């Protein structure tokens, strides 16, 4: 499903963010990516949806060879990946419903598909009642659930999340995690970079720890492992 | 592309236009001024060409009789001219007739002749048998004793063509400068839109919208600016020309071409140029500021 082969990433200013990372994630896995600030977690995530390009190495996601991708194919690749961010990245002037529908509108889905899918995912994240509201009227946890709904509406085979609970209190963090587990149960791969020790330690999933741009630990049913 | 997508791009394009009110106004104005000058010079050129043609077709040679020729000598001079080769007909216009005619043309301003006596010469007007003979005939007339000054179409056409060329050169430079300014202002307006919409653009890219889809509204915005920039001068020029055609009295060989004819030659050029400027401006902007 996802494979990185000896991936190096050096930013324009000379910062070496990743140094020889190799990892393989199978379809349907749930993987935490942990590590201290500046370890390279976000870089790892960004390489997977080609927000950044590797300096060296190979990256495969789904059927796509990410760094060999033609410009025209990038949109097609992104439609198979759902991305969730710490700051939700919602459009404030649109309603909840419109924010989710936006992801389908801009890939020219039919009106019927949009209606059907948006209803489905809003129901899944438990926000059907608040479809007409503005993001500003929602709690942080609810806003993030809109973000997840938008990531899911396209039926991606993988959800990539960069600190999705970073701005949330414990209750809301758990809500998002439960949601991810539900999605994962349906066969969607989840890769989640996180600082949230309680979640990681309580759920016993695969943990990949990155430090100084290298994978220092890769554990099935692992734990957070840092005192921080 | 789906019809619905075209509708969406158009809607978004219009929204962007109004969102950037003043920038849009500046860009549209620049394009409008450019195309106004372009339209004006095309209309002017068409008319100058037409007047040239009128003159050419008149086959007319005007021969001024020098004041030293007495009234008694005139008939002999007329005969001599009439017998030159290539003359189809000849008419005599006396000083008095010429003054009368001039006063009629000048109407209210005729009083400027008061006290001057009659500065106009006696004149013979010769018609050549065909257009090619006009200049040859003029040369022959020139050498007839008692004729002081000969005018025929060609000399005048030469002057007209020089004017046309000057108008054209001036217009090309001006239009070139304004064109660059128009494209610059349009691309700058779109840059602002792109900046204002960077969040949306970011999400569009993230969820897999194609480059073409993301660019659509900006392209529409630029093209609309160009189109409005063409519509305004098209309308103003049309009305202006029609007014002139109806209200300005000219005498042959001067005449204005009919409004519909000039409109059919000018309007589509303006519209095409407007669309071109707008599309180009938006492409410049997207190349530089829309990394997709
Ligand atoms: N766009 C960038 N340009 C330059 N350096 C960057 C950029 N993004 C991240 N870095 C650097 O790369 C390293 C890894 O960053 P990041 O992947 O964001 O780590 P994490 O998400 O684990 O905190 C850090 O030293 C960071 O400063
Ligand atoms: Mg990070």
Image (cartoon, rainbow, N blue to C red):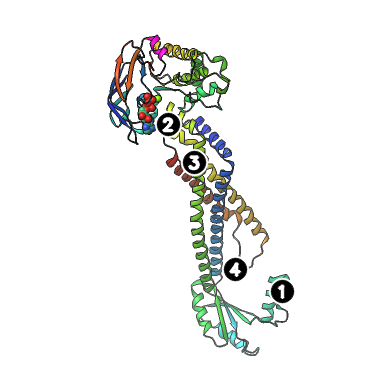
Circle 2 is placed at which residue position? B210
Kindly report the distance in space between the C-alpha atoms of the residues bearing marks 1 and 2.
Answer: 73 Å
Placement of B38 over or under A166, stated as above or below: below
The nearer-to-camera label among 3 and 4 is 3
Q: Is the residue at mark 1 from the same chain as the one at mark 2? A: yes
Q: Which quarter of the image is occupied by the C terminus of chain B?
A: top left
The nearer-to-camera label among 2 and 4 is 2
Circle 1 is placed at which residue position? B110
Circle 4 is placed at which residue position? B253
Disc on the earlier residue, 2 or 4: 2
The nearer-to-camera label among 3 and 2 is 3
Verify CB contact (< 8 Å) between mark 2 and mark 4. no
Kindly report the distance in space between the C-alpha atoms of the residues bearing marks 2 and 4.
Answer: 61 Å
Q: Is residue B213 visible?
A: yes
Disc on the earlier residue, 1 or 2: 1
Kindly report the distance in space between the C-alpha atoms of the residues bearing marks 3 and 4.
Answer: 52 Å
Q: Secondary structure at mark 4?
A: loop
Q: Which residues are magenta?
A: A195-203
Q: Is residue B161 left or right of residue B122?
A: left
- Number of other residues with Cα within 10 Å of mark 3, as a class: few under 14, some 14 to 19, many 20 or more: many
Kindly report the distance in space between the C-alpha atoms of the residues bearing marks 4 and 1.
Answer: 21 Å
Q: Is residue A66 magenta?
A: no
- Number of other residues with Cα within 10 Å of mark 1, as a class: few under 14, some 14 to 19, many 20 or more: some
Disc on the earlier residue, 3 or 4: 3
């Amino acid at each position: 499903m996802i494979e990185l082969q000896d991936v190096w990433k050096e930013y324009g200013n000379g910062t070496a963010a990743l140094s020889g990372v190799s990892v393989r994630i199978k379809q349907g896995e749930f993987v935490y990516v942990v590590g201290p600030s500046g370890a390279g977690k976000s870089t790892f995530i960004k390489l997977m949806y080609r927000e950044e390009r590797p300096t060296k190495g190979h990256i495969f996601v789904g059927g796509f060879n990410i760094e060999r991708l033609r410009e025209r194919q990038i949109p097609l690749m992104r439609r198979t990946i759902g991305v969730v961010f710490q700051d939700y990245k919602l459009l404030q002037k649109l309603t909840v419903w419109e924010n989710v529908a936006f992801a389908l509108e801009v890939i020219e889905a039919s009106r019927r598909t949009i209606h059907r899918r948006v209803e489905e995912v809003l129901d899944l994240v438990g926000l059907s009642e608040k479809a007409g509201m503005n993001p500003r009227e929602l709690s942080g946890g609810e806003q993030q659930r809109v973000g997840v709904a938008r990531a899911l509406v396209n039926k991606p085979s993988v959800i990539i999340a960069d600190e999705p609970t970073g701005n949330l209190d414990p209750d809301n963090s758990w809500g998002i995690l439960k949601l991810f587990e539900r999605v994962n149960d349906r066969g969607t791969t989840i890769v989640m970079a996180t600082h949230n020790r309680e979640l990681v330690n309580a759920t016993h999933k695969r943990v990949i720890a990155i430090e100084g741009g290298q994978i220092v630990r890769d554990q099935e049913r692992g734990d957070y492992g840092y005192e921080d | 592309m789906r019809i619905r997508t075209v509708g969406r791009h158009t809607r978004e394009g219009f929204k962007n236009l109004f969102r950037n009110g003043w920038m849009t106004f500046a860009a549209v104005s620049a394009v409008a001024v450019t195309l106004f000058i372009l339209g004006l010079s095309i209309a002017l050129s068409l008319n100058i060409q037409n007047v040239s043609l009128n003159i050419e077709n008149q086959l007319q040679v005007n021969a001024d009789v020098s004041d030293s020729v007495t009234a008694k000598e005139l008939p002999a001079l007329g005969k001599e001219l009439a017998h030159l080769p290539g003359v189809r007909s000849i008419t005599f216009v006396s000083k008095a007739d010429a003054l009368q005619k001039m006063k009629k043309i000048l109407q209210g301003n005729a009083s400027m002749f008061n006290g001057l006596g009659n500065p106009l010469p006696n004149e013979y007007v010769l018609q050549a048998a065909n257009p090619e003979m006009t200049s040859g005939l003029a040369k022959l007339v020139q050498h007839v004793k008692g004729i002081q000054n000969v005018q025929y179409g060609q000399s005048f056409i030469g002057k007209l063509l020089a004017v046309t060329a000057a108008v054209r050169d001036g217009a090309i430079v001006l239009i070139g400068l304004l064109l660059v300014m128009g494209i610059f202002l349009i691309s700058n307006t779109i840059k602002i839109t792109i900046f204002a919409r960077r969040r949306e653009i970011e999400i569009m890219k993230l969820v897999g919208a194609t480059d073409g889809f993301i660019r659509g509204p900006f392209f529409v915005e630029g093209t609309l600016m160009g189109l409005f920039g063409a519509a305004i001068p098209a309308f103003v020029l049309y009305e202006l020309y029609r007014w002139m055609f109806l209200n300005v009295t000219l005498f042959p060989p001067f005449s204005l071409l009919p409004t519909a004819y000039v409109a059919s030659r000018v309007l589509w050029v303006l519209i095409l140029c407007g669309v071109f400027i707008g599309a180009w401006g938006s492409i410049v902007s997207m190349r530089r500021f829309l990394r997709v």
